[in-house]
Amino acid sequence: MRDQAAWQLDVRPAVGGDADTLVIVFGGRWRIDQSLPAPDTLKDRLDASVRRVRFDANELADWDSGLLSFVSEISKSCADRGIAVDGSGLPPGALRLLTMAQAVPEQKLAERDKGPQGSFAQVGTATLEFFRGLPQMLDFLGEVALSLLRLLSGRAGFRARDLWLEIEEIGPRALPIVSVISFLVGLILAYLGADQLKLVGAQIFIADLVAIGMVREIGALMTGVIIAGRTGAAFAAQLGTMQVNEEIDAFKTLGISAIDFLVLPRILALMLMVPLLTLYSGFIGMLAGLLVSATIFDIGVFEYYTETLRALDFRQFAVGLSKGAVYGAMIAFSGCLRGMQCGRSAEAVGHAATSAVVTAILLITISASIMTIVYYQLGI
C-alpha cells in the first residue's frame, strides 16, 4: 500500500459470498495533481462474471475532480456492459457532483446531410420546413403586434438607452458600407442609362434615371440587403447566444417580457433608421450619377442638377421612405425570429444567423414586389 500522501486503490470481491459483486476501494489522496491510475486498468476486471460494482471510500483522505473523472469512466464502462453500479460508498459531495454530471443530456447537434438530394426532394423538404415553421412565425408576429400595442399605451417594458444604442449601431456605423455600395450602384445605373440614351441623343435623362431609380426603388432595396447581412445576422446571433446561455429563460423566470425588452427596441431602431439610410443612399447614388455625367458624357453640373429637381417630387421620396420602413421591419422580424428560435448549441447560432439573412432577403423581395404593384395600381 502507498503512504497517506498518495492515492490507494484496491479491487476485491464483495464479502459474504457475493461472487458477482466487485468492490473498488479508494484510499489516500485522489487529487488531479497526483499520478492517478488510468481507468483502463480496471476495465479488464469487468468480465462476464461481474454483475454489480460497488465503490468504497471509507479510507479516502482527500479528493477532487480526479476521483470524479475516474469514477465516471468506470461507471460508463459498467453501463456499456450492463453492470449495475452502487455509488453509495462515495463521499456525499462526490456522489452529488457525479449525479449532476450524469444528469446532463447529451448535446444533439443538427443532423448532417447524408448526401445530395434530388430537386423534388429539396423542394419537398423546403415546403415541409416552411409549413412547420409557419405557426411559430405567426405566433411571433402576434407577440410583436401585442408588444407594439403595449408601446402605444405606454406599458412596454424596455430601456430607452437600449433603443439609442441600437440606433447608433444600425445608423451611423452603417454609413461607410452604405456609401460605398450606393455610389457603385449609382455609377452602374448612370453607365447603363447612358449606353441606351445616347442612341437617341438624350443623355441628359441620365439624371432622371439615376434619381428616380435610386430614390424610389434601388436605394431602399440595396440598403435593405446591406442591413439584412450586417444587422439582421447580428440580431439573430445576439439573441441566439442569449438562448444558448439561458438568458432569455432568466427573463421569463423574472417575469420580464423578452419581446418587449429585447425585440421591440431592435424593431423600432430598424424601422427608424432604414428609411433614413435609404434617403442617404439615394443622394449618394445621385452624386455618383452626377460624377459620371459631368466627367464622361460632358453634361454640365447645373444641367444635371436642374433635371434631377424636375424628375423628383415628394411622391418619389414618400415611396422610397415607405419601402425603407417596411424593409427595416422585415429585417428586424427575421433576425429576432431566428434568434428566438435558436437551439442550444454554437452550431445552432450560426444556423440562425444564416437563416435570418436568407429570410430577410426573401421577405424584402416579396415586399418590394407587392408594394411596387400596389403603387403602380394606385398611380403613385
Image (cartoon, rainbow, N blue to C red):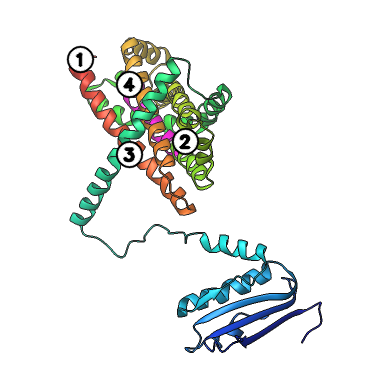
Judge from the rendering whether residue 104 lies leftward or rightward of residue 188; answer left or right.
right
Q: Nearer the viewer, mark 1 or mark 2?
A: 2
Tell me the residue at 65%/70% (across/down). 90
Q: Nearer the viewer, residue 127 or 230?
A: 127
Which residue in the structure is indicated by mark 4?
216
Q: Secondary structure at mark 3?
A: helix
* First of labels 1, 4 by sequence position: 4
Q: Main secondary structure of the magenta part?
A: helix
When asked about the image quadrant of residue 28, the answer is: bottom right
Q: Position of residue 373 (x, y in %)?
A: 21, 24
Q: Nearer the viewer, mark 1 or mark 4?
A: 1
Can you say whether 315 is above or below 109 in the image? above
Q: Are marks 2 and 3 in contact (CB under 8 Å)?
A: no
What label sits on residue 378 in the rendered view? 1
Q: Secondary structure at mark 4?
A: helix
Judge from the rendering whether residue 103 lies leftward or rightward of residue 361; answer left or right.
right
The residue under label 1 is which amino acid type? Answer: Leu
The answer, for residue 263, to whether it is visible in the render is yes
Label 2, label 3: how far apart the Cα atoms are: 22 Å
The residue under label 4 is which amino acid type? Answer: Arg
> In the current view of this chain or complex, which residue is farthest to the front?
16
Tell me the residue at 41%/49% (across/down). 351
Which residue in the structure is indicated by mark 3?
136
Residues packed near mark 4 inside 10 Å, few (<14), some (14 to 19) or many (20 plus): many
